Image (tube, helix red, strand yellow):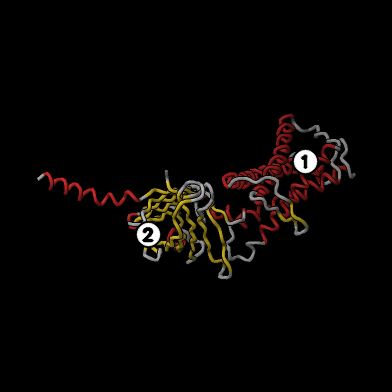
C-alpha cells in the first residue's frame, strides 16, 4: 500500500519534474536586443516603417516541452516611432492608436508549437486600441546558450500580420500591418 | 510718418499690425481646415507646408514688431478713453503678443520635436532647438489648438472694440491704425 501511494505520488510529480528544465526569461530591452517593428503599405507604393521604443515582457521556455511555453508582452503605445515627428503625433491620436485612452497594447500567449526544424507557431491574445483578438505569430528559434558575460540567452524571430480594421482602426481601410519581432531573452537568475 | 509719434502710429507699426492680423486669421482658418483633411486629399501635404512657413513668418514679424515698439514712442491713448478702457486695452494688447508667441512656439515644437527642422518657404530650414518626448509633443499640440482659439477670439474682440470706437464713439482709435489720424 505504501509502495502504491509512493508510486502514485511519484506519478503525479513526474510531469512537473520535466519543468525543472523550463526557465523564465526576460526580454532584453535594456540592451535593445529585442525589437517590435511594423510596416504598413503606403498607397501601394512603398511602406511606412516604424517601431515601438518602449515595451517589456517575459516568457518561460523549455526546449524539451516547448508547448508549455508562455509569453507576455506589454507595449507602451505612446512610444510609436516612425522617424517622423508629425506622423508619430498623428499615429498617437484618435485616428490610430488612441494612446490617451489605450496607453498599452498587450500580447498574452495561449499556445505554442515548435517543430524539429526550430520553426513554430505562437498564438495569443493581442490587445490593441482596446480590442482583443487572437494573433498568430510565425516563430523561428535562432539559438540558445551561454553568453560571454556569465548569463544565458535565447533568441527568436517572429513575424505576423493583421488587418488594422480588426482593431477598430479604420482610417486606412483594409490595410494590413506586417509585424517583425526580434526577440532576445535573458534567463532569469 | 514711418516712425510712431507721441500721438499716432507710423507706417511700419501699421503695416506690421495689419499683415500680422491677416496672416494670423488665415493661419487659423488653414489650421482648422488642414487638420481635418483626409490622407488622400490633394492639399494634405501642401496646406501644412504653407501653414508652417507663414507661422514662422509671423513669429519673425512679432520679434520685429516688439523691437520696433521698443525703439519708438508709444502714441498716447485718446483723451476721451476712460481709465478702464485704457486698462483693458493695454492688457489685451499684451495678451495678443503673448498668445501669438506661445501659439507660434508650440507649433514649431510639434514639428521639431524629434530633431528635424522646419522648412521656411523652401528657402532654408529652421533647425530644431529642443527635442521633446511624445507626451510633451501632444501637450504642445493641445496648447497650439486651444490658445489659437483664444488668440482669434481675443483678436476678434479687439477688432469689435475698434469698430465700436469708430462707429459708435466716433473717435480716432481705428483711424490711428489706418494712418488717417495723421491727417486730422
The reply to whether the C-beta atoms of the residues labelled 1 and 2 are less than 8 Å apart is no
Q: Residue B106, position in %: x, y?
A: 66, 45
Rounded to the nearest whole Å, what is the CA distance between mark 1 and mark 2? 78 Å
Q: Give the camera-side residue of A119 and A176.
A: A119
Count of marks, rendered view: 2
Q: Which residue is at 78% across, 47% downward?
A: B61
Residue count near mark 2 (Cα–Cα under 10 Å), binned few <14, some 14–19, many ≥20: some
Q: Give the camera-side residue of B151 and B40.
A: B40
Q: Which residue is mark 1?
A: B170
Q: Which residue is mark 2?
A: A123
Q: Which residue is at 58% across, 63% downward?
A: B39
- Judge left or right: residue B129 versus residue A113: right
Q: Residue A186, position in %: x, y?
A: 46, 49
Q: Chain of mark 1?
A: B
- Say which of marks 1 and 2 sits in front: 2
State the SS at label 2.
Answer: strand
Residue B115 shows in this picture: yes
State the SS at label 1.
Answer: loop
Q: Which residue is at 76% across, 43% downward?
A: B166
**Residue B162 position by quadrant:** top right
Q: Give the camera-side residue of B138 and B41.
A: B138
Residue B7 vertical placement versus A39 (above, below):
above
Residue B16 vertical placement versus B5 (above, below):
below
Residue B26 shows in this picture: no
Q: Chain of mark 2?
A: A
Q: Residue A176, position in %: x, y?
A: 48, 65
Which disc number belongs to residue B123? none
Q: Which residue is at 52% across, 46% downward?
A: A30
Amino acid at each position: 500500500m505504501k509502495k502504491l501511494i509512493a508510486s502514485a505520488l511519484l506519478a503525479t510529480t513526474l510531469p512537473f519534474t520535466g519543468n525543472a528544465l523550463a526557465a523564465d526569461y526576460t526580454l532584453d530591452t535594456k540592451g535593445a536586443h529585442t525589437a517590435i517593428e511594423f510596416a504598413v503599405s503606403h498607397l501601394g507604393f512603398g511602406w511606412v516603417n516604424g517601431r515601438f521604443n518602449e515595451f517589456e515582457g517575459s516568457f518561460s521556455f523549455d526546449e524539451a516541452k516547448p508547448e508549455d511555453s508562455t509569453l507576455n508582452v506589454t507595449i507602451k503605445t505612446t512610444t510609436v516611432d516612425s522617424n517622423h515627428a508629425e506622423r508619430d503625433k498623428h499615429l498617437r491620436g484618435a485616428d490610430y492608436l488612441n494612446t490617451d485612452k489605450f496607453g498599452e497594447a498587450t500580447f498574452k500567449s495561449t499556445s505554442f508549437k515548435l517543430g524539429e526544424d526550430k520553426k513554430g507557431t505562437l498564438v495569443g491574445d493581442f490587445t490593441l486600441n482596446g480590442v482583443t483578438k487572437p494573433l498568430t505569430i510565425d516563430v523561428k528559434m535562432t539559438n540558445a546558450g551561454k553568453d560571454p558575460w556569465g548569463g544565458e540567452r535565447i533568441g527568436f524571430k517572429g513575424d505576423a500580420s493583421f488587418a488594422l480594421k480588426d482593431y477598430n482602426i479604420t482610417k486606412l481601410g483594409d490595410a494590413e500591418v506586417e509585424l517583425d519581432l526580434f526577440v532576445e531573452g535573458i534567463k532569469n537568475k | 510718418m514711418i516712425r510712431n509719434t507721441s500721438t499716432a502710429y507710423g507706417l511700419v507699426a501699421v503695416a506690421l499690425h495689419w499683415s500680422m492680423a491677416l496672416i494670423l486669421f488665415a493661419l487659423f482658418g488653414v489650421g482648422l481646415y488642414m487638420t481635418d483633411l483626409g490622407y488622400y486629399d490633394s492639399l494634405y501635404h501642401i496646406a501644412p507646408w504653407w501653414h508652417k512657413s507663414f507661422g514662422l513668418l509671423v513669429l519673425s514679424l512679432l520679434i520685429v514688431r516688439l523691437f520696433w515698439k521698443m525703439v519708438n514712442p508709444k502714441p498716447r491713448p485718446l483723451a476721451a478713453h476712460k481709465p478702464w478702457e485704457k486698462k483693458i486695452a493695454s492688457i489685451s494688447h499684451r495678451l495678443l503678443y503673448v498668445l501669438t508667441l506661445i501659439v507660434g512656439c508650440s507649433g514649431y515644437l510639434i514639428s521639431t520635436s524629434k530633431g528635424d527642422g522646419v522648412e521656411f518657404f523652401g528657402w532654408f530650414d529652421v533647425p530644431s532647438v529642443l527635442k521633446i518626448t511624445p507626451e510633451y509633443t501632444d501637450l504642445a499640440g493641445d496648447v497650439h489648438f486651444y490658445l489659437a482659439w483664444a488668440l482669434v477670439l481675443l483678436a476678434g474682440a479687439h477688432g469689435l472694440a475698434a469698430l465700436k470706437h469708430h462707429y459708435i464713439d466716433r473717435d480716432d482709435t481705428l483711424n490711428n491704425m489706418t494712418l488717417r489720424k495723421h491727417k486730422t
